[in-house]
Amino acid sequence: MSAILEVCSLQKSFQGFSLKEISFSLERGYIMGFIGPNGAGKSTTIKLIMNLLKRNGGTIAVCGLDNLRSEKEIKNKIGFVYDENFYYEDLTVAQMKMIIAPFYRNWDDGSFQKYLRNFALPMHKKIKELSRGMRMKFSLAVALSHHAELLIMDEPTSGLDPVIRSELLEILSWIMQDDRQGIFFSTHITSDLEKIADFVTFINDGRIVFSAAKDDVVDNFGLVKGARDSLSSDLKKHLIGMRENQFGFEGLVKDKHLVKRLFRDSVVIEKPSLDEIMLYFTRRPQSV
Protein backbone atom coordinates (compact mmCIF):
# COMPACT_ATOMS: atom_id res chain seq x y z
CA MET A 1 0.00 0.00 0.00
CA SER A 2 1.10 3.57 -0.66
CA ALA A 3 1.89 5.95 2.21
CA ILE A 4 -1.12 7.75 3.66
CA LEU A 5 1.18 10.54 4.92
CA GLU A 6 4.55 11.42 3.45
CA VAL A 7 6.68 14.32 4.68
CA CYS A 8 9.86 14.98 2.71
CA SER A 9 12.62 17.53 3.54
CA LEU A 10 10.10 19.80 5.26
CA GLN A 11 11.47 23.19 6.33
CA LYS A 12 9.99 26.04 8.32
CA SER A 13 11.89 28.95 9.85
CA PHE A 14 10.91 31.22 12.71
CA GLN A 15 13.03 33.61 14.70
CA GLY A 16 15.03 31.38 17.02
CA PHE A 17 13.70 28.05 15.71
CA SER A 18 13.47 26.06 12.49
CA LEU A 19 12.38 22.68 11.17
CA LYS A 20 15.49 21.28 9.54
CA GLU A 21 14.44 19.26 6.47
CA ILE A 22 12.44 16.66 8.37
CA SER A 23 11.23 13.52 6.59
CA PHE A 24 9.04 10.56 7.60
CA SER A 25 6.14 8.53 6.21
CA LEU A 26 3.16 6.60 7.53
CA GLU A 27 1.62 3.62 5.73
CA ARG A 28 -2.07 2.78 5.78
CA GLY A 29 -3.19 0.46 8.55
CA TYR A 30 -0.74 1.74 11.17
CA ILE A 31 -0.50 4.15 14.10
CA MET A 32 2.51 6.46 14.27
CA GLY A 33 3.41 8.14 17.55
CA PHE A 34 4.98 11.59 17.19
CA ILE A 35 7.07 12.46 20.24
CA GLY A 36 9.46 15.15 21.39
CA PRO A 37 9.91 17.72 24.16
CA ASN A 38 8.00 21.00 24.24
CA GLY A 39 9.29 23.31 21.53
CA ALA A 40 10.74 20.46 19.46
CA GLY A 41 8.53 21.15 16.42
CA LYS A 42 5.57 18.78 16.86
CA SER A 43 2.82 21.42 16.65
CA THR A 44 4.60 23.24 13.81
CA THR A 45 4.77 19.99 11.83
CA ILE A 46 1.07 19.30 12.35
CA LYS A 47 0.11 22.85 11.32
CA LEU A 48 2.18 22.46 8.15
CA ILE A 49 0.47 19.14 7.35
CA MET A 50 -2.89 20.89 7.80
CA ASN A 51 -1.63 23.82 5.68
CA LEU A 52 -2.18 26.27 8.53
CA LEU A 53 1.37 27.57 8.12
CA LYS A 54 3.35 28.36 4.97
CA ARG A 55 6.38 26.11 4.63
CA ASN A 56 9.81 27.29 3.50
CA GLY A 57 10.66 24.10 1.65
CA GLY A 58 9.93 20.41 1.21
CA THR A 59 6.75 18.53 0.35
CA ILE A 60 3.80 16.98 2.18
CA ALA A 61 1.53 14.38 0.58
CA VAL A 62 -1.68 12.99 2.10
CA CYS A 63 -3.18 9.97 0.35
CA GLY A 64 -0.74 10.65 -2.48
CA LEU A 65 -1.98 14.23 -2.97
CA ASP A 66 0.09 17.38 -2.46
CA ASN A 67 -1.29 19.25 0.55
CA LEU A 68 -1.07 22.61 -1.23
CA ARG A 69 -2.42 21.79 -4.67
CA SER A 70 -5.19 19.52 -3.33
CA GLU A 71 -5.94 21.23 -0.03
CA LYS A 72 -9.74 20.99 -0.16
CA GLU A 73 -9.77 17.33 -1.18
CA ILE A 74 -7.18 16.45 1.48
CA LYS A 75 -9.12 18.13 4.27
CA ASN A 76 -12.05 15.90 3.40
CA LYS A 77 -9.72 12.92 3.94
CA ILE A 78 -8.36 14.10 7.32
CA GLY A 79 -10.01 13.83 10.71
CA PHE A 80 -8.42 16.07 13.34
CA VAL A 81 -8.62 15.78 17.13
CA TYR A 82 -7.15 18.63 19.22
CA ASP A 83 -6.38 18.54 22.93
CA GLU A 84 -8.41 21.73 23.34
CA ASN A 85 -12.09 22.47 22.80
CA PHE A 86 -12.82 24.58 19.72
CA TYR A 87 -16.57 24.07 19.69
CA TYR A 88 -19.30 26.55 20.69
CA GLU A 89 -19.80 25.68 24.32
CA ASP A 90 -23.39 26.92 24.58
CA LEU A 91 -24.56 24.67 21.74
CA THR A 92 -25.68 21.08 22.18
CA VAL A 93 -23.98 18.11 20.54
CA ALA A 94 -26.81 17.98 17.98
CA GLN A 95 -26.57 21.72 17.19
CA MET A 96 -22.80 21.58 16.86
CA LYS A 97 -23.11 18.68 14.44
CA MET A 98 -25.48 20.73 12.25
CA ILE A 99 -22.80 23.41 11.91
CA ILE A 100 -19.92 21.01 11.21
CA ALA A 101 -21.54 18.50 8.84
CA PRO A 102 -21.95 20.80 5.78
CA PHE A 103 -18.18 21.38 5.62
CA TYR A 104 -17.57 17.73 4.67
CA ARG A 105 -18.47 16.29 1.30
CA ASN A 106 -18.69 12.73 2.67
CA TRP A 107 -20.44 13.42 5.95
CA ASP A 108 -22.30 10.29 7.07
CA ASP A 109 -25.00 11.02 9.63
CA GLY A 110 -25.60 7.31 10.20
CA SER A 111 -21.96 6.87 11.21
CA PHE A 112 -22.16 9.91 13.49
CA GLN A 113 -25.22 8.50 15.27
CA LYS A 114 -23.46 5.14 15.61
CA TYR A 115 -20.43 6.76 17.24
CA LEU A 116 -22.63 8.74 19.61
CA ARG A 117 -24.25 5.48 20.73
CA ASN A 118 -20.92 3.64 21.00
CA PHE A 119 -19.35 6.49 22.97
CA ALA A 120 -22.49 7.05 25.12
CA LEU A 121 -22.67 10.73 24.10
CA PRO A 122 -25.96 12.56 24.82
CA MET A 123 -27.26 14.48 21.76
CA HIS A 124 -29.00 17.22 23.73
CA LYS A 125 -26.29 18.05 26.25
CA LYS A 126 -24.42 21.32 25.78
CA ILE A 127 -20.72 21.10 24.94
CA LYS A 128 -19.85 22.95 28.17
CA GLU A 129 -21.69 20.28 30.16
CA LEU A 130 -19.55 17.47 28.77
CA SER A 131 -16.58 16.16 30.72
CA ARG A 132 -13.12 16.46 29.15
CA GLY A 133 -13.26 12.79 28.20
CA MET A 134 -16.69 13.16 26.60
CA ARG A 135 -15.52 16.21 24.64
CA MET A 136 -12.63 14.16 23.30
CA LYS A 137 -15.05 11.41 22.26
CA PHE A 138 -17.23 14.01 20.53
CA SER A 139 -14.18 15.30 18.63
CA LEU A 140 -13.38 11.73 17.65
CA ALA A 141 -16.97 11.08 16.50
CA VAL A 142 -16.83 14.18 14.30
CA ALA A 143 -13.42 13.21 12.92
CA LEU A 144 -14.63 9.73 11.96
CA SER A 145 -18.06 10.60 10.58
CA HIS A 146 -16.89 11.88 7.19
CA HIS A 147 -14.94 8.66 6.46
CA ALA A 148 -11.55 10.25 7.12
CA GLU A 149 -8.63 8.14 5.96
CA LEU A 150 -5.98 9.90 8.05
CA LEU A 151 -6.68 10.71 11.69
CA ILE A 152 -4.36 13.39 13.14
CA MET A 153 -4.42 13.62 16.92
CA ASP A 154 -2.63 16.36 18.86
CA GLU A 155 -2.24 15.44 22.56
CA PRO A 156 -5.64 13.68 22.65
CA THR A 157 -5.06 12.02 26.04
CA SER A 158 -3.60 15.07 27.80
CA GLY A 159 -5.48 15.82 31.01
CA LEU A 160 -7.61 12.67 30.89
CA ASP A 161 -7.76 10.30 33.83
CA PRO A 162 -6.22 6.82 33.33
CA VAL A 163 -9.58 5.09 32.87
CA ILE A 164 -10.72 7.45 30.09
CA ARG A 165 -7.26 7.35 28.48
CA SER A 166 -7.39 3.57 28.41
CA GLU A 167 -10.87 3.67 26.89
CA LEU A 168 -9.74 6.11 24.19
CA LEU A 169 -6.78 3.87 23.30
CA GLU A 170 -9.15 0.91 22.98
CA ILE A 171 -11.30 2.97 20.58
CA LEU A 172 -8.25 3.80 18.46
CA SER A 173 -7.24 0.14 18.34
CA TRP A 174 -10.77 -0.73 17.22
CA ILE A 175 -10.66 1.95 14.50
CA MET A 176 -7.43 0.50 13.15
CA GLN A 177 -9.13 -2.77 12.29
CA ASP A 178 -9.78 -0.94 8.99
CA ASP A 179 -6.38 -1.16 7.32
CA ARG A 180 -7.28 1.62 4.86
CA GLN A 181 -6.84 4.21 7.60
CA GLY A 182 -3.84 5.59 9.46
CA ILE A 183 -3.39 7.51 12.72
CA PHE A 184 -0.75 10.18 13.38
CA PHE A 185 -0.70 10.56 17.16
CA SER A 186 1.29 13.43 18.71
CA THR A 187 1.67 13.13 22.47
CA HIS A 188 4.01 13.62 25.42
CA ILE A 189 2.43 10.62 27.24
CA THR A 190 4.72 8.00 25.74
CA SER A 191 3.23 5.17 27.82
CA ASP A 192 0.10 5.49 25.65
CA LEU A 193 2.19 4.95 22.53
CA GLU A 194 3.85 1.90 24.04
CA LYS A 195 0.40 0.32 24.16
CA ILE A 196 -0.88 1.08 20.65
CA ALA A 197 1.72 2.63 18.31
CA ASP A 198 3.25 0.65 15.46
CA PHE A 199 5.84 3.31 14.59
CA VAL A 200 7.47 6.15 16.50
CA THR A 201 8.88 9.36 15.08
CA PHE A 202 10.99 11.37 17.52
CA ILE A 203 11.68 15.06 16.84
CA ASN A 204 14.06 17.21 18.85
CA ASP A 205 15.18 20.78 18.16
CA GLY A 206 13.53 20.72 14.72
CA ARG A 207 15.32 17.54 13.60
CA ILE A 208 14.08 13.96 13.29
CA VAL A 209 16.14 11.84 15.67
CA PHE A 210 14.61 8.59 14.41
CA SER A 211 11.48 7.30 12.68
CA ALA A 212 11.17 3.55 13.06
CA ALA A 213 8.99 0.64 14.11
CA LYS A 214 8.29 0.95 17.84
CA ASP A 215 9.35 -2.65 18.51
CA ASP A 216 12.69 -2.04 16.76
CA VAL A 217 13.27 1.08 18.85
CA VAL A 218 12.69 -0.55 22.23
CA ASP A 219 14.48 -3.78 21.17
CA ASN A 220 17.63 -2.07 19.87
CA PHE A 221 18.11 0.75 22.38
CA GLY A 222 19.32 -0.21 25.83
CA LEU A 223 19.83 1.30 29.28
CA VAL A 224 23.35 0.41 30.34
CA LYS A 225 24.17 0.37 34.05
CA GLY A 226 27.36 -0.43 35.87
CA ALA A 227 29.90 0.45 38.52
CA ARG A 228 31.96 3.58 37.96
CA ASP A 229 35.15 1.56 37.46
CA SER A 230 33.54 -0.20 34.47
CA LEU A 231 32.96 3.13 32.68
CA SER A 232 35.84 2.97 30.21
CA SER A 233 36.54 5.46 27.41
CA ASP A 234 35.54 2.75 24.92
CA LEU A 235 32.13 2.36 26.56
CA LYS A 236 31.59 6.13 26.70
CA LYS A 237 31.84 6.23 22.90
CA HIS A 238 28.61 4.22 22.70
CA LEU A 239 26.63 6.25 25.22
CA ILE A 240 23.95 8.78 24.31
CA GLY A 241 23.95 10.85 27.45
CA MET A 242 24.84 9.53 30.90
CA ARG A 243 24.05 9.97 34.56
CA GLU A 244 26.60 9.28 37.28
CA ASN A 245 26.33 9.03 41.04
CA GLN A 246 28.51 7.72 43.86
CA PHE A 247 27.42 4.15 43.17
CA GLY A 248 27.77 3.95 39.40
CA PHE A 249 26.43 5.19 36.09
CA GLU A 250 23.50 4.80 33.72
CA GLY A 251 23.39 5.67 30.02
CA LEU A 252 21.52 4.99 26.80
CA VAL A 253 22.97 3.10 23.83
CA LYS A 254 21.56 2.69 20.32
CA ASP A 255 22.72 -0.91 19.86
CA LYS A 256 22.45 -2.89 23.08
CA HIS A 257 23.36 -6.14 21.32
CA LEU A 258 26.72 -4.72 20.19
CA VAL A 259 27.44 -3.28 23.64
CA LYS A 260 26.58 -6.62 25.25
CA ARG A 261 29.04 -8.42 22.96
CA LEU A 262 31.80 -5.88 23.60
CA PHE A 263 31.50 -5.45 27.35
CA ARG A 264 29.82 -8.70 28.42
CA ASP A 265 29.21 -9.01 32.16
CA SER A 266 30.89 -5.74 33.15
CA VAL A 267 27.58 -3.91 32.57
CA VAL A 268 23.87 -4.59 33.00
CA ILE A 269 21.59 -3.77 30.07
CA GLU A 270 17.85 -3.14 30.53
CA LYS A 271 15.00 -2.41 28.15
CA PRO A 272 14.26 1.35 28.12
CA SER A 273 10.89 3.04 27.94
CA LEU A 274 10.18 5.60 25.22
CA ASP A 275 10.27 8.22 27.98
CA GLU A 276 13.79 7.21 28.95
CA ILE A 277 14.96 7.18 25.32
CA MET A 278 13.57 10.68 24.81
CA LEU A 279 15.07 11.90 28.09
CA TYR A 280 18.60 10.84 27.19
CA PHE A 281 18.46 12.31 23.69
CA THR A 282 17.15 15.64 24.95
CA ARG A 283 19.79 15.77 27.71
CA ARG A 284 22.47 14.92 25.19
CA PRO A 285 25.08 17.67 24.70
CA GLN A 286 24.92 19.20 21.23
CA SER A 287 28.58 18.31 20.62
CA VAL A 288 27.99 14.59 21.12
Image: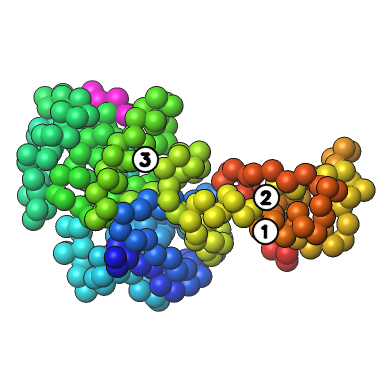
Three-letter code, disc 1: Asp
169 left or right, relative to 253: left
Q: Rounded to the nearest whole Å, what is the CA distance between mark 3 and mark 2? A: 29 Å
Q: Which residue is identified by label 3?
A: 156
Q: Rounded to the nearest whole Å, what is the CA distance between mark 1 and mark 2? A: 7 Å
Of the residues tagged 3 and 2, which is closer to the observer? Answer: 2
Magenta stretch containing residue 131, yes or no?
A: yes
Where is residue 59? Give x, y as percent: 35, 74
Q: Quadrant of residue 169?
A: top left
Residue 104 appears in the picture as rendered: yes
Which quadrant is home to the C terminus? bottom right
Where is residue 258? Give x, y as percent: 72, 60
Residue 93 position (above or below residue 217):
above
SS at circle 2: strand
Q: Which residue is identified by label 1?
A: 255
* Magenta part of the chain: 128-133
Q: Residue furthest right?
A: 229
Q: Residue at x 15, y 44 (%)?
A: 145
Of the residues tagged 3 and 1, which is closer to the observer? Answer: 1
Q: Main secondary structure of the magenta part?
A: helix
- Do the CB atoms of the residues marked 1 and 2 lie less than 8 Å apart? yes
SS at circle 3: loop
Decide which of 156, 53 is in the foreground and name it. Answer: 156
Where is residue 24? Give x, y as percent: 43, 65
Three-letter code, disc 3: Pro
Q: Residue at x 15, y 28 (%)?
A: 117
Q: Earlier in the sequence, mark 3 or mark 1?
A: 3
Q: Which residue is identified by label 2?
A: 222
- Do the CB atoms of the residues marked 3 and 2 lie less than 8 Å apart? no
71 left or right, relative to 82: left
